[in-house]
Image: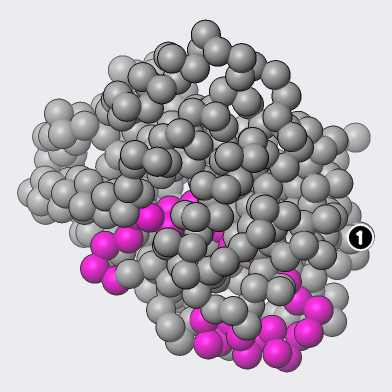
Amino acid sequence: MSKLPNIGTSIFTVMSQMANEHDAINLSQGFPNFPVDKRLTDILSRLSTQNVHQYTPMSGHPPLLKKIQLLTQQSYQRAITKDEILVTAGATEGIFAAIQALVHANEEVIILDPSYDCYEAPILLSNAKPIRVSLQDDFTPDWESIQAAANGKTKLIIINNPHNPTGKVWNANDFLQLKNLLTDFPKLIVLSDEVYEYITFEQPHISIHHHPELWNRSISISSFGKSFHITGWKIGYLIAPEHLMKEIKKVHQFLVFSVNSISQVAIAEYLDIVDVHDLVDFYQQKRDFFRSLLRQTKLELLPCEGTYFQVGSYANISSEDDLAFTKRLVTEFGVATIPISTFYANGKDTKCIRFCFAKDDETLTEAAERLMKL
């Protein structure tokens, strides 16, 4: 019998396979197609002949831990200790380890839909119950529904800010409401997925790190893969108070023990010469360029406040459900996207699709030209 009977092949795999089969432009999966910073690849090339190929300490390469401390201080004015940091095999492993370590059988975890697909499986494998609460129509949190969903069994609430798939970012009132929720439920812990933390536009990113009152009950998830265009390296990090981190490390050590050594050493060195805050201008130019192209199509564009994803509505083009529409986009128009309904537990069809604009200008231009034929 399957432990995950209702989980099938990821929509990201399905759409990428269709893109390959039909020679379509792949704007579905969230990976960049432009070159990695040459400074980083030069560091990697030089390190490949050095003695950096053996296990690092379980928590992470010590110089990298120090750089994460400095980065957190510079970005959020939060001082953390090395014992509050864990380098992970991508953000997904960090999320999995945290949930497996902290959530027990018959407890509940609140997930805000539409949500990324890696949250539910570790909850189910913990014999716990995912509680799916839909965001409002503008994709902001519905705090009345969240409050109603919480109870004495609720162990964790997973928040994702900036938000995949919609590109929404939280405001100050959202964090006020979150604090109220934690006051009402003293055992509740926050798992804050912030992998797009350095990709926000007009509205600055507000992090869990900006709120000292939340630190003792919060775990943050970050991704070097997203920040440095190296998604295939699968390297991220987790920050949590020591009493939670102690339990998370127990799981991490039996998942991967330690993360790829050369990538840790390379990133530790790269952090001395790169400014993560340059990502804002880089991706805002991408976003604005792509939006200017899509305005020439029949799609209605929703706001994109952060991430490298743009959501568009096709409601005035077709009455098809979004899965059928996205498949037809691949087969008839040669562009692969992601249907938003797949991010909802109930498959809610909003007639919206998600584009990844972390692509070179040539790719975005060609995709838009094909979409103009809709």
Q: Quadrant of the C terminus?
A: top left
- The answer to whether residue 338 of the structure is visible from this angle is no
- Determine the secondary structure under disc 1: loop
Q: Which residues are magenta?
A: 175-203
Query: Does residue 236 sit above or below 169 in this rendering?
Result: above
Give yes or no for residue 177 being in the magenta stretch: yes
Q: Residue at x 73, y 80 (%)?
A: 150
| Residue annotated with mark 1 | 105
Give yes or no for residue 222 being in the magenta stretch: no
Q: Quadrant of the N terminus?
A: top right
Question: Residue 131's spot in the image, x, y percent?
Answer: 71, 67
Q: Residue at x 69, y 84 (%)?
A: 182
Residue 329 as seen in the image, left or right of residue 227: left
Give the quarter of the image for residue 166: bottom left
Residue 127 as seen in the image, left or right of residue 301: right
Q: Nearer the viewer, residue 152 or 101?
A: 101
Residue 39 as seen in the image, left or right of residue 268: left
Give the quarter of the image for residue 21: top left
Amino acid type at circle 1 is Ala
Give the quarter of the image for residue 123: bottom right
Question: Residue 152's spot in the image, x, y percent?
Answer: 84, 82
Q: Nearer the viewer, residue 347 or 141?
A: 141
Q: Residues within 10 Å of mark 1 (few under 14, many from 20)?
A: few
- The answer to whether residue 50 of the structure is visible from this angle is yes
What is the basis of the colouring in this image? one colour
Query: Does residue 332 sit above or below 173 in this rendering?
Result: above
Question: Residue 81's spot in the image, x, y percent?
Answer: 66, 59
Question: Residue 40's spot in the image, x, y percent?
Answer: 37, 27
Q: Residue at x 83, y 55 (%)?
A: 246
Residue 145 as seen in the image, left or right of residue 354: right
Q: Residue at x 50, y 37 (%)?
A: 268
Q: Nearer the viewer, residue 240 or 342?
A: 240
